[in-house]
Structure formats: C-alpha cells, structure tokens
C-alpha cells in the first residue's frame, strides 16, 4: 500500500515538472522585452570620418583656397595698414613767387571769338622743382580764364587776347595760384595800309593826267589817295589766336604751399 502511494507521488511530481516552462536563464532578449517596446538588432553604425586624401593631407585646391581665405581675412582685419602702404608719402613745399611755369593749352582762344571770363584749361608741360624736388609734376591740370579779348578794329587798334591761370591740381588736390598775364597782340598792318593808299593815289594821278594834263594829274592824285584811304578804313586788321596744343610761358606771382609726393 505504501509503495503505491510513493509511486503516485512520484508520477505527480514528474507531471508538474513537465508542465513548467524554461527558467529565466533561457529567456531571449526579444522574449524578455515587454510587448510594444522597440527592439535593436545588430550593432550601432560606426562614426563617419571625412576623407582627407592621401596621407591625411589636404588636396592642392583645398590648400590654395585656405591660403586665399587667410590672406583675405588678414586684409579685412587690417585695412588701414594696407592703405598706408599704397598711399605715397607727402611733403609740404613752398613754390616761391617768380617760379616759371610752362603750360600746354587745351582750350583754344581768339581775339575774334573769345570773351572775358571764358574758361581756359591746360596742363603743365614741364616739372616744376623746388630745392631739387618735383613740386608740380608735368601733366598737372591747370585752369584759368580770359582776362582781355579785343577784336581787330578799323584804322587803329590791333587785335589782342590775354589770359591768366588761377588753379593747379597736384596729387588730386586743387591749389589756388595766380600767374602773370599771358598776352598776345596781332601784327601791325601799317606797311600794307601804306601800299593800299599809294596804289590808290598812283592810279588816280594816271587817270587825271589822261583826262586833263598836269592839273588833272594833281586832282587825280588827291582823289586816288582818298580812295585808297577809304579802302584801308573799310578793311579790318588781323586777328590773334592761340590754338589747342600751343605752349605758353608764364610765372607764378604769389608763393603757394603744395603737398608734393616724395
């Protein structure tokens, strides 16, 4: 009887053991995770490292770009220094009164067409030096005006034109100056006038002699001379002009201080 009881207990124990699942040690991570939780399979991706080319050094294009960028950054960081290097050194010099000045005209002037106060422009033909240093370089722009313009008159008065300069530009800076007058006068025509009167008198005498002998010749001379004088009175004299490209010479009448490039 006791043997049967032991056998029955043993059978029940085996049955209970068979009904239980595998223990915690046999549970996989997927089975142990709660429902709906994300699962991770595999390994995490490796960090990406940018390629630097052969030997880890930057390529030639990248190196040049980096150098250019560094240079631009340096210039932007020190703009005053760059301007100081490019600007020429200046020194104040005084141009004394009486200094010669040679100018090439860019504006034509004429006694027949110009009016007083008409603008006149030109440029310096030769360097003006003070103490061995160029103070007004050749090519410096100058400007002024017509101060006198007299067209040719009849019988008396020759044509004339005069101008003066009052400004010069050196290194992009204008300076006020005052030059001596530059004047020109037309050539005299007295010799031509005498010829005209003489020809008129001679022609009158010839006509008078043919018409009435000696008395007629005397009358003809007077009449012919008067006619010749009339021709002179009706004829204007020569005009005077200075064309563009003409070179004129003058002097600076008052001292002027100029900042000249060294």
Image (spheres, grey):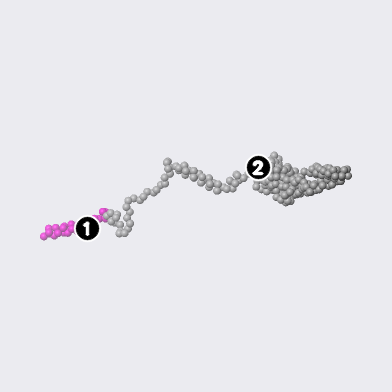
**Residue appearing at x 32%, y 52% in the figure:** 41
Residue 147 percent location from the top left of the image: 74, 49
Mark drawn on residue 194: none
Residue 186 percent location from the top left of the image: 76, 45
Left or right of residue 227: residue 57: left
**Residue appearing at x 43%, y 44% in the figure:** 52
Q: Does 61 appear in magenta?
A: no
Q: Does 2 appear in magenta?
A: yes
Residue 171 percent location from the top left of the image: 65, 46
The residue carrying pointer 1 sits among few (fewer than 14), some (14 to 19) or many (20 or more) residues within 10 Å by Cα, namely: few
Q: Residue furthest right?
A: 215
**Residue appearing at x 36%, y 50% in the figure:** 45
Q: Which residues are magenta?
A: 1-26
Mark drawn on residue 262: 2
Left or right of residue 45: residue 204: right
Pair 1/2: label in front: 2
Q: Is residue 205 visible?
A: no
Residue 159 percent location from the top left of the image: 77, 47
Distance of label 1 from label 2 (alpha carbons)? 108 Å
Q: Residue furthest front?
A: 211
Q: Is residue 236 visible?
A: yes
Mark drawn on residue 20: 1
**Residue appearing at x 64%, y 44% in the figure:** 89
Mark 2, secondary structure of its residue: loop
Left or right of residue 261: residue 191: right
Left or right of residue 155: residue 23: left
Mark 1, secondary structure of its residue: loop
């Amino acid at each position: 009887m006791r043997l049967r009881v032991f056998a029955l207990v043993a059978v029940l124990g085996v049955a209970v053991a068979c009904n239980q699942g595998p223990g915690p040690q046999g549970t996989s991570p997927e089975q142990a995770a709660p429902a709906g939780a994300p699962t991770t399979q595999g390994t995490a991706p490796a960090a990406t490292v940018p390629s630097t080319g052969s030997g880890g050094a930057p390529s030639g294009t990248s190196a040049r770009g980096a150098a250019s960028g560094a240079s631009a950054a340096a210039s932007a960081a020190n703009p005053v220094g760059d301007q100081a290097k490019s600007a020429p050194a200046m020194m104040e010099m005084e141009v004394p009164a009486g200094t010669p000045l040679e100018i090439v005209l860019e504006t034509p002037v004429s006694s027949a067409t110009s009016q007083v106060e008409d603008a006149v422009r030109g440029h310096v033909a030769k360097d003006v030096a003070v103490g061995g240093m160029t103070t007004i370089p050749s090519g410096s722009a100058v400007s002024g005006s017509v101060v006198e313009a007299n067209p040719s008159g009849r019988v008396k008065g020759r044509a004339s034109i005069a101008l003066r300069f009052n400004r010069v530009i050196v290194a992009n800076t204008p300076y006020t100056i005052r030059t001596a007058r530059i004047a020109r006068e037309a050539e005299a025509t007295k010799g031509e006038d005498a010829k005209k009167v003489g020809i008129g008198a001679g022609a009158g005498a010839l006509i008078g002699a043919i018409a009435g002998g000696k008395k007629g010749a005397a009358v003809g001379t007077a009449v012919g001379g008067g006619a010749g004088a009339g021709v002179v009175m009706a004829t204007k004299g020569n005009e005077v002009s200075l064309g563009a490209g003409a070179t004129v010479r003058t002097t600076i009448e008052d001292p002027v201080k100029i900042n000249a490039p060294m």
